[in-house]
Amino acid sequence: MKTALITGITGQDGSYLAEFLLDKGYKVYGLRRRTATENDSNIKHIKHEIEFISGDLSDLSSLIEAVKIAQPDEVYNLAAQSFVADSWMQPIFTGQVTALGVTNMLEAVRQVKLDSRFYQASSSEMFGKVVETPQNETTPFYPRSPYGVAKVYGHWITVNYRESFDMYACSGILFNHESPRRGFEFVTRKITDGVAKIKLGLQNELRLGNLEAKRDWGFAGDYVKAMWLMLQQEVPDDYVIATGETHTVKDFIEIAFQYVGLDWRNHVVQDPKFIRPAEVDLLLGDSSKAKDKLGWQPTVSFEQLVQMMVEHDLQRLGNGL
């Protein structure tokens, strides 16, 4: 039986990855911070199958102890301050967790179990003000937020530990991936939750920022398989994971409102307070390398993804949850 340690296990990606690994017969350990209230909604259905360890990416000693306890064959570092908008409000905290936290996790693995295979969750936000389209593994980074800057650090420190200490360490440069488990602060979930509330008569308008921003959106359940595939290869490497399609926020809105039979123009209001200080206008990934070397490809279309999320929120709100 293989053993995996997942940081950020209660988040969207962590929950789908835990499901995936449990189905493959792994023993799964989850690192989570001790907080006054626990948010286990994404993993409540599998919570009894997971061993939890208290720890924090900003505390190296807790990470060393976690690796000692889990003795993992594979480490998936998914935890981060991951909300781009908040990274301008909390730039130092974002750097401490999303950037230096990666170093702490790598150092814990290096000190305790060097033969563990390590996955770092890199991000398409590293490309930021893109210098070429589509973006692949060799596209230069130009981050446009403290979050993006922190992710660039995390990406390169992973490469550095791989080359300096001969660690099996990979980075997955994942483009936007969504699901019904996405946090409500993210624009996609804000849209689908808002559409469901409007359809059910719980509110009448949806206030959003830039509707013209373009993103390459896929389904999180597809993307966690790519993480696992990266750690099954003979040689560690970095991979872009994306659908190869780009859509505007407006496209997302139109499909969501069409699904419930409403005209989005009657309900969506653009609010300047939701405009980023520095916008990322276009992200479009080229995942040819992942398709060729990993045999990975997405299975859920953009339209299916949007409809899946709207349907989930309709059922959640309709049942009074």
Image: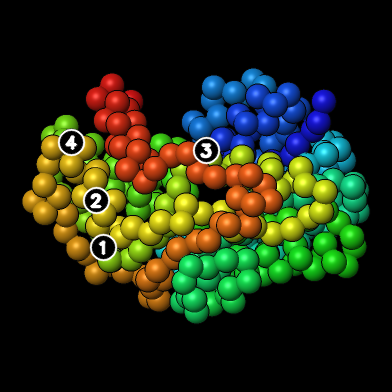
The x, y position of residue 294, in whole percent, is 67, 47
Q: What residue type is labelled 4?
A: Val
Query: Mark 3 = which residue?
Result: 221
Crowd rating for badge 3 (residues with CA inside 10 Å; few <14, some 14–19, many 20+): many
Residue 253's label in the rendered image is 2
For the residues labelled 1 and 2, the Cα–Cα distance comes to 9 Å
In the rendered structure, which amino acid carries the disc numbered 1? Leu
User: Please, what secondary structure does the residue beneath circle 2 have?
Assistant: helix
- The residue beneath circle 4 is 260
Residue 93's x, y, as percent?
58, 64
Report which quarter residue 215 is drawn in.
bottom left
User: What label sits on residue 211 in the rendered view?
Assistant: 1
Which of the two labelled residues, at mark 1 and mark 3, occupies the earlier sequence position? 1
Which residue is at the front of the view, 68 or 244?
Answer: 244
Question: Is residue 136 shown left or right of residue 32?
Answer: left
Q: Where is residue 282 in the image (x, y as percent from the top left)?
A: 40, 68
Q: State the CA–CA distance, disc 3 to disc 2.
A: 22 Å
Q: Residue sitting at 46 percent across and 71 percent down?
A: 133
Q: In this view, does 247 lie above or below 49?
A: below
Q: Which mark is residue 120?
A: none
Q: Residue at x 81, y 54 (%)?
A: 235
**At numbered mark 1, what does the secondary structure look like: helix, strand or loop?**
loop
Q: How far apart are marks 2 and 4 (CA)?
A: 11 Å
